[in-house]
Image (tube, grey):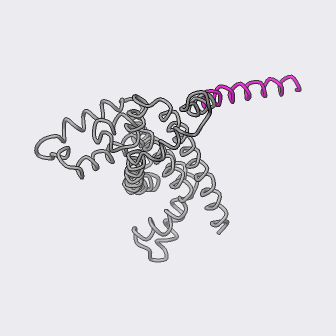
Amino acid sequence: MRKATLWNWFWILLGLLYFFLPLLATFHFSLRARKEALSLLAYQQMIEDTRIWQALLYSIQIGLLTIGLGLLLMVPTVYWVHLRARYLRPMIEFFSLLPFVIPAIVLVFGLIRIYSGDPFPLTNTYAGTDFLLIAGYVVLTLPYLYRAIDAGMTAIDVATLTEAAQSLGAGWGTILFRVIVPNLRSAMLGAAFLILAIVLGEFTIASFIVGLRAFGPVIWQVGQNRAYEASALVIFSFLLTWILMALINFVARRAVVTSGPR
């Protein structure tokens, strides 16, 4: 038993070293922007670069719109499948896995090919490219969004809640938004923060549709020209992602505590 415990701790420590050593090396490199001295010069330059913050704000806005559109499409679909069309679950699960099989580069070239001319010339305007980017991100994050909503829907008794609400005279809209959605808060919030983290770090789709307006391509360009500032930006992106993950845990726990047994 003791030998097994030591062996488990060995693999845990090995995994932690494998994960954190590159981050520590990147952080140390980001402090060497000033010769022969450790300094926060790279972080200062990063903070003073308004283009980075504009791109970050733009990507956050795109992420929030992606979350809204994805939830609006997926929650009613998964609810209906669980309630009336369980035979469709294998097909929906298959389609939700396609973004893992089809590379993002294929998706973005397909979008550009179809929507760069008549009858839908969406690539000719900022609003059109924003919509294409959001649509592409909805497809890209479909596996995570579907599984989060499906797990949350499986955890509740959809049929009983629906029948109870109908017996009280509730319509379909009331049932969905006032009965089902409140019971999916944890799943929806988890999916939302995960989607936002993916959107902030995505490069392929953003670089071909909107270019340097998005956060991912800006990180890439900074890395091509300014090594120390790029390292600082990587550390910042890592901390931002972990903050989002911490918010998932915090909000999910608050949702469980505030909802409680009913």
Q: Is residue 38 above or below residue 145?
A: above
Q: Which residues are magenta?
A: 1-23
Q: Quadrant of residue 36?
A: top right
Residue at (48, 35) in percent of width and height? 229
Would you say 110 lies left or right of 161 here?
A: left
Residue at (52, 70) in percent of width and height? 164
Return the residue nearer the eye: 254 or 261: 254
Does the magenta segment cover residue 10? Answer: yes
Report the quarter where the C terminus lies. bottom right
Residue at (51, 44) in percent of width and height? 44
Would you say 131 lies left or right of 199 here?
A: left
Q: Quadrant of residue 220?
A: top left
Q: Looking at this rendering, what residue extends furthest in the bottom direction? A: 169
Does the magenta segment cover residue 4? Answer: yes
Report the quarter where the N terminus lies. top right
Percent of width and height locating residue 189:
52, 55
Q: Quadrant of residue 117?
A: top left
Q: Is residue 255 above or below residue 198?
A: below
Return the residue nearer the eye: 173 or 53: 53
Q: Is residue 21 above or below residue 65?
A: above
Percent of width and height locating residue 53:
42, 49
